[in-house]
Amino acid sequence: MNQPLFDYAERPSFDGATFDYTQDFERLTKSLDRVAHLMRDGQARTLSQIAQAVGSSEAGVSARLRDLRKPRFAQDYQLAAVHSERLDGGLWLYSIDPA
């Protein structure tokens, strides 16, 4: 895995009613790192392709892509935008533009 772009202790945290820092922070942060590092190349991928590449579930990848749309995480990873494109049959492609 690539090195994080910054120290985990210095990053903004996740949020939400079910988020428990002691149980979730490290796991979600590592997952976010893997998704962001993979997707920074700008290549379009399906959730399935991303999930297989980073060793996560499609639901987890979808959640991390939503996180990367949030300004606090996009700024951390130096991302300009997260794109999604719907293909025929309901399949979606995702790509990320680095800043």
Image (cartoon, rainbow, N blue to C red):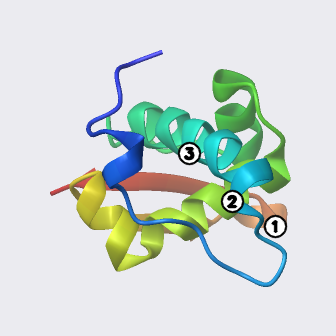
Q: Nearer the viewer, residue 35 or 21?
A: 21
Q: Which mark lies nearer to you, 3 or 2?
A: 2
Q: Residues within 10 Å of mark 2 (few under 14, many from 20)?
A: few
In the rendered structure, are the residues bearing label 1 and label 3 in contact, judged by CB atoms less than 8 Å apart?
no
> Can I make out residue 81 in this image?
no
Q: Nearer the viewer, residue 10 or 76?
A: 10
Using the numbered discs, state the Cα–Cα distance from disc 1 to disc 3 in whole angstroms. Answer: 29 Å
Q: Earlier in the sequence, mark 1 or mark 3?
A: 3
The residue indicated by pointer 2 is 21
Residue at the (57%, 36%) spot, across then down: 30
Left or right: 56 with respect to 77?
right
Left or right: 12 with respect to 80?
right
Q: Which mark lies nearer to you, 1 or 2?
A: 2
Query: Is the C terminus in the top left, top right, bottom left or bottom right quadrant?
Result: bottom left
The residue indicated by pointer 1 is 90
Amino acid type at image mark 2? Tyr
The residue indicated by pointer 3 is 29
* Residue 4 pos. (x, y %): 35, 31
